[in-house]
Amino acid sequence: MSKLRVGVLFGGRSGEHEVSLLSAASVLKAIDPKKYQVIPIGITREGRWVTATDAERLLAGESLHPRQLRAGDPDVTAPAAVLARGEAIIVPPVPSKNRTGSLVPFETHGNQAHQALNVDVIFPVLHGTFGEDGTIQGLFELAGIAYVGSGVLGSATGMDKDVMKRLFASAKLPITKHVTFLRGEWEAGSKKIISRVEAALKYPVFVKPANLGSSVGISKAHDRRELTPAIEMAASFDRKIVVEQGVGGKRGKARELEVAVLGNDNPEASVVGEVVPIKEFYDYEAKYLSEGSDLIIPAKLTRQQTRQVQQMAIAAFKACDCSGLARVDFLLDPGKTGRIYLNEINTLPGFTAISMYPKLWEASGVKYAELIDRLIQLALERRVEKDRTQYSR
């Protein structure tokens, strides 16, 4: 019996490029070679695709930049130099008519003529823009390939913090007060936007680009003086900006809770974890560059709080029409009310062996290699369900 062919796709054009390399390195190290024929596929920062040989060189080379991300395994994490050079290029695929799906180049380059990457399933380990926002998922749908994670709609809604909050509100899930505006509105009248924010919210506030992950571009503004540069930074990353009311206000920092969700139509929730960041909040540097942040699994909550958070995580997963996997983040008010707010959902969370998503499932009894197996099976199940749909009369 032939092995299942799994394409592990990583890199990409987003600001989370390095995080993607770390996640992919962990997946490639843990995936069972007895079960799967693994094809590494890299995407450069410029959006060019590199074939398996150079993808392997990327992941098997020397260390990253001297300011190396701490979340990866140094033995299997490699430099971005090969991707930067963009050797052995293939171009994005066109739809395939075979039953398993394949990535077929639009063009051919030299001795790559007529080559195709035939796979049974794609495991995208792409974080952020162009990786978990529905764009690459649309490509897989056109090609008729099974893939791990949410579809076009779930990925797009999970990426856009404004649309996400609208869906949460529609599902009657508790969210923080917030204000959304466009970069063009800010540039046309910053004073009007500041007045609008201050009329709706109290300091401190969090300023976020609507469509990025790993806390890239997020700032905490304690007053008007800090608000303007925070908005300017967020606007450099996205055309849509979300400003949120800080939970806990000036009384103290909110507790940051996280739950991992796994499944398709009948998802399951993991135990609840808590992040205690070394910095004022769990930003990109606290996640990947600085030592000292604590991950507490399971979080110290009452049974009722644990059950509530798990139920809210599944409800959020369904509200955004997600599938496969997602990490759902919450904020617990440190005050007497102890109110729990749904913060956001992440449809392709960090996936190194020591990232929060795999650690939450390990604490729930699902080991890392088994988790990879489950996700691949869920991808195949979803493709079978998709193929039941009729598209013509």
Image (cartoon, rainbow, N blue to C red):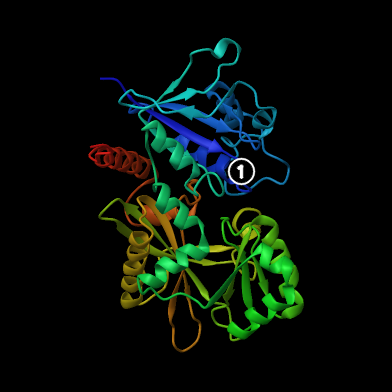
Q: Position of residue 137 (x, y in %)?
A: 44, 42
**In the picture provided, is 347 more to the left or to the right than 291?**
left
- Residue annotated with mark 1: 17
Q: Position of residue 298 (x, y in %)?
A: 40, 65
Q: Position of residue 95 (x, y in %)?
A: 41, 28
Q: Give the amino acid type for the residue marked by disc 1 in the picture.
A: His
Q: Is residue 107 above or below residue 174?
A: above
Judge whether residue 296 can be spotted in this image.
no
In the rendered image, the quadrant that contains the N terminus is top left
Query: What residue is rendered at 35% in x and 50% in y?
Result: 323
Query: What residue is rendered at 67% in x and 63% in y?
Result: 183
* SS category of the residue bearing label 1: helix
Quarter of image, res 186: bottom right
Looking at this view, is 162 or 391 the one in front?
Answer: 391
**In the picture provided, is 221 more to the left or to the right than 41?**
right
- Crowding around mark 1 (Cα neighbors within 10 Å: few <14, some 14 to 19, many 20+) is many
Query: What residue is rendered at 71% in x and 74% in y?
Result: 227
Quarter of image, res 62: top right
Quarter of image, res 375: top left
